[in-house]
Image (cartoon, rainbow, N blue to C red):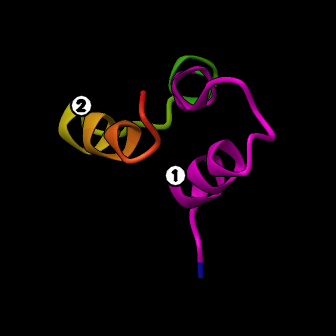
Amino acid sequence: MIGLLGVVLLARRKQLVPSARALLLRPQVEAGIYLTSDITEAALKTVGE
């Protein structure tokens, strides 16, 4: 099973999206989905953002 974070990171690694950060911020703003900044930053580091 893979969650939203995993899908976004995979898409970024395969260069299907220009920015993982933008895709992770949008659901937080629009849908109230919350990821801690520690998790978000650690995940973004794995894709060079």
Q: Quadrant of residue 16?
A: top right
* Residue in the foreground of this view, choosing between 40 and 16: 16
In the image, 45: left or right of 15? left
Q: Is residue 37 above or below residue 29?
A: below
Q: Is residue 2 above or below residue 38?
A: below
Q: Which mark is residue 47?
A: none
Magenta span contains residue 46 = no
Magenta span contains residue 23 = yes
Look at the image and give the residue range highlighted in magenta: 2-25
Q: Mark 1: few, some, or many residues within 10 Å (few <14, many ≥20)?
A: some
Q: Quadrant of residue 48?
A: top left
* Amino acid found under the numbered disc labelled 1: Leu
**Can you identify the residue that label 2 sits on?**
37
Q: Quadrant of residue 40?
A: top left
> Residues under labels 1 and 2: Cα distance?
13 Å
Q: Residue at x 47, y 42 (%)?
A: 47
Q: Which mark is residue 5?
A: 1
Magenta stretch, main secondary structure class: helix
Residue 13 picture location, percent across and down: 62, 49
- Residue farthest along the right direction in this orientation: 16
Residue 11 picture location, percent across and down: 71, 49
* Amino acid found under the numbered disc labelled 2: Ser
Q: Quadrant of the N terminus?
A: bottom right
Residue 49 picture location, percent across and down: 42, 27
In the image, 23: left or right of 14? left
Q: Residue at x 51, y 25 (%)?
A: 21
Q: Mark 2: few, some, or many residues within 10 Å (few <14, many ≥20)?
A: few
In the image, 6: left or right of 10? left
* Residue in the foreground of this view, choosing between 40 and 27: 40
- Which secondary structure lies at badge 1? helix
Residue 42 picture location, percent across and down: 26, 43
